[in-house]
Image (spheres, rainbow, N blue to C red):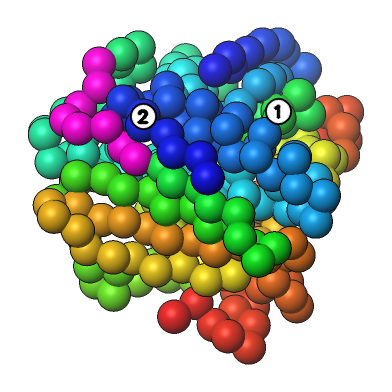
């Protein structure tokens, strides 16, 4: 399955727009992307899930590792998500209370 | 009944989701949201099955890895009495569902030390019942789904009346 990653800069924030399905086959690519961004000094990362059709616990694990990684640098980690089906996965795992979830990229990077 | 034999590699999990999605779509009792529940639960079960076999064979998942490991994963879907039953069988050496590591609550900052541990709780929340049956050298996970999401909606922090077992 396809995973699309698009990286852009918004002031101090680095925005990663993810598209497609995040599962055991594709999550390693997102993980690598987040690791290399943090290693390159990007410590404010916003991951947009607006074009994501599916996420499972493997994808959640990668986002948790991203959050943890930027926190060790005193940075910020924000998610953008409005699609009810994707939100539900965060909701039922209780992760909505852990992640900073916004409705738009604008909101996320100006928070 | 739909029987599917899947080579044990990460890329086939999306195939399992497609198949279960198509099966659910033919059943008017199951709406789109319930279909998404099944796709997620089956994704978790197949991921566990493949990872169990990869662990048993000492294979580390890495980007671009394309080989399959050991025997195929077996997925058996049965529609009966308005319910959908999905059984996923692996040959990953078996595991003890009661011996799972207990992670801190999700709101506890130390929970971030663990990236995993959401898969089986998710299956338990999404399915109306789940059984882990040891088989010859592996595990069969049997999940049963009724048309509606079990309610009231349970979460990992609000475990609901029936709990997570």
| Above-or-below relation of A50 to B31 | above
Q: Quadrant of residue A48?
A: top right
The front one of B164 and A73 is B164
Q: Position of residue B64 (x, y in %)?
A: 35, 12
Q: Determine whether B65 is above or below A43 in the image.
A: above
Q: Taking A5 as reference, is B135 above or below it?
A: below
Disc ID at residue A52: 1
- Label number found at residue A83: none
* Residue sitting at x 49%, y 61%: B143
Magenta stretch bounds: B67-74
Whether residue B160 is visible to the viewer of this picture, yes or no, is yes
Report if residue A13 is visible in the image. Answer: no
Image spot of residue B16 (x, y percent): 50, 33
Which of the two marks, 2 or 1, is nearer to us in this view? Answer: 2
Measuring from the top left, give residue A37's x and y in whole percent. Answer: 51, 18
Q: Is residue A25 magenta?
A: no
**SS category of the residue bearing label 2:** strand
Residue that badge 2 annotates: B6
In the displayed structure, B72 sits above or below B141; it is: above
CA neighbours of label 2 inside 10 A, class few (<14), some (14 to 19), many (20+) = some
The reply to whether dot 2 and dot 1 touch (C-beta < 8 Å) is no
Residue A50 image point, x, y percent: 78, 29
Q: At 29% across and 75% down in the image, what residue appears?
A: B98
């Amino acid at each position: 399955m396809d995973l699309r990653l698009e990286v852009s800069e918004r002031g101090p924030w680095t925005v990663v727009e993810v598209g497609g399905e995040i599962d055991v086959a594709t999550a390693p690519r997102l993980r690598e992307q987040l690791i290399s961004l943090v290693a390159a000094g990007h410590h404010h990362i916003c991951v947009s899930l607006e074009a994501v059709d599916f996420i499972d616990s493997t994808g959640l694990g990668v986002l948790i590792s991203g959050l943890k990684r930027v926190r060790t640098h005193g940075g910020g980690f924000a998610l953008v998500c409005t699609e009810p089906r994707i939100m539900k996965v965060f909701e039922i795992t209780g992760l909505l209370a852990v992640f900073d979830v916004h409705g738009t990229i604008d909101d996320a990077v100006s928070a | 009944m739909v029987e599917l034999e899947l080579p044990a590699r990460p890329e086939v999990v999306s195939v399992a989701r497609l198949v279960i999605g198509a099966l659910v779509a033919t059943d008017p009792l199951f709406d789109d949201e319930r279909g998404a529940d099944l796709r997620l639960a089956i994704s978790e079960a197949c991921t566990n099955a493949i990872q169990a076999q990869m662990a048993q064979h000492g294979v580390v998942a890495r980007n671009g890895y394309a080989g399959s490991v050991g025997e195929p994963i077996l997925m058996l879907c049965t529609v009966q009495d308005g319910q959908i039953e999905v059984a996923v069988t692996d040959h990953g050496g078996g595991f003890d569902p009661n011996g799972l590591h207990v992670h801190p609550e999700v709101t506890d900052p130390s929970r971030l030390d663990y990236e995993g541990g959401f898969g089986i709780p998710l299956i338990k929340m999404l399915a109306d019942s789940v059984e882990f049956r040891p088989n010859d050298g592996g595990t069969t996970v049997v999940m049963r789904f009724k048309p509606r999401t079990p309610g009231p909606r349970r979460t990992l922090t609000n475990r609901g009346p029936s709990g997570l077992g």
